[in-house]
Amino acid sequence: MPVFSIFILLLIFVFSFFGLYIYGVDAYTLNGESILTPPSVYHYLGTDRLGRDILARLMEGGKVSLIIGVGSAFIASVIGLLLGSVAGYFRGTVDKAFIVTVDLFLTFPTFFLLLALVSYVNASAWVLIVIISITGWMTTARLIRAESFKITSQPYIKILNIANVAKLKILFKYYAPILAPIYFVSFTFGVGGAILAESGLSFLGLGIVAPQMSWGTILSAGKDVVEIAWWVSFFPGLMIFLVTFSLINISNYLQQLTNKKQIQS
C-alpha cells in the first residue's frame, strides 16, 4: 500500500488549509525592502517580486489548487460514472447517443477545448471547476461503459431484467459495487490532471485572476525571474509535482487491486 504517498497528500492538505493558522504571515502583504529575497530565517522559502512571502503564498494558493483539483475530478468522475453506466446498461439508442457525444468532445484536444472555454469567461476557482469537469469526464465514461457492457451480459442481470426488477435498483445494487474501483482510480487520476490543467492555464495567464492565487499563478509569476530567483517557481512546482506523483502512485495501487479482483473473479 502506498502509505508514503497518502502521508504526503495528508501533509500537503494540512499545510494548505491549516498552515497559515500556525505560520501567521499574510500572503498578500507587500514589502519593498524584501524583494526577491532568497530563503532565509526571515522568509523560509524566500519572497517574490513584490516582497510577498512565498511560504504563505504556497499555503494560500494550495487551498485554491486543491479545491479545483478535488472538485473538478469529483464532478467529472460522477458525470462519467452516470453516463457510462447508463450507456452500458441500456445500450441501443442510448449507447449510440453516448458514443456520438463522446466522439464530439474528443474531436478537439482537451487542453485546447479548455483554452477555448476559459478565454470567454473570467476565470475563478468555481468557473475552472465547471470547465475542467466539462472537458474531463470522457475517459471515465468510456471505461465505465466498457465495464457496464460486461456486467450487462452476465446471466444474473438478464434474470433480473426478466423479473422486471427496477432498473435504478439494478444499477445501484449490482453495478455500483463493481464500478466503484474504476471510479476511484479515475478520480485520483482526475485530481492530478485537474491541478495540472489549472496550473497550465495559470501559467499562460488564463487561470486564477489576482488577487486570488494558486500554485499555477505563483509558478507563472516566477518565470520571468527564474534565472535570478529560482525559489519563486521552484517551490510551487515542487508542490504540484508531489501531489500529482502521490496521486499517480495511489491510482496505480488501486488499479492493481482492481486487476487482481477481476482475475480472481
Image (cartoon, grey):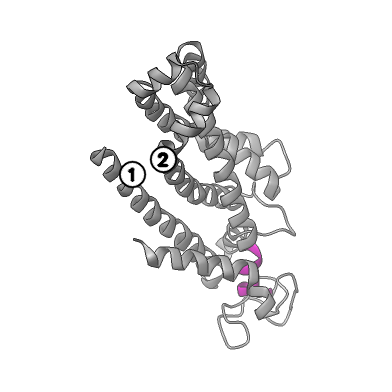
Q: Quadrant of the C terminus?
A: top left
Query: 263 and 112: which one is in front?
Result: 263
Dot 2 corresponds to which residue?
A: 182
* Apparent side of residue 213 relative to residue 15 in the rendered image (left or right): right
Residue at horizontal 75 percent and vertical 74 percent from the top: 30
Dot 1 corresponds to which residue?
A: 258
Q: Position of residue 83 (x, y in %)?
A: 53, 27
Q: Which label belongs to residue 144?
A: none
Residue 6: in magenta span: no
* Apparent side of residue 253 relative to residue 227 in the rendered image (left or right): left
Q: Quadrant of the N terminus?
A: bottom left
Residue at horizontal 70 percent and vertical 71 percent from the top: 27
Query: 228 and 19: which one is in front?
Result: 19
Q: Position of residue 56 (x, y in %)?
A: 65, 73
Above or below for 96 versus 193 = above
How many numbered circles does the render carry? 2
Q: Residue furthest bottom?
A: 41
* Magenta span of residues: 52-61
Residue at horizontal 75 percent and vertical 59 percent from the top: 211
Query: 210 and 186: which one is in front?
Result: 186
Instruction: Identify which amino acid the numbered label 1 is placed on.
Output: Thr
Q: Main secondary structure of the magenta part?
A: helix
Identify the image quadrant of residue 6.
bottom left
Q: Alpha-carbon distance for marks 2 and 1? A: 8 Å
Q: Can residue 99 be seen in the rendering of this structure?
A: no
Is disc 2 surrounded by few (<14), some (14 to 19) or many (20+) residues within 10 Å? Answer: many
Above or below for 6 versus 74 = below
Mark 2 in CB contact with mark 1 (< 8 angstroms): yes
Label 2: element kind: helix
Give the mark nearest the N terminus, 2 or 1.
Answer: 2
Above or below for 45 versus 238 = below
Instruction: Identify which amino acid the numbered label 2 is placed on.
Output: Ile
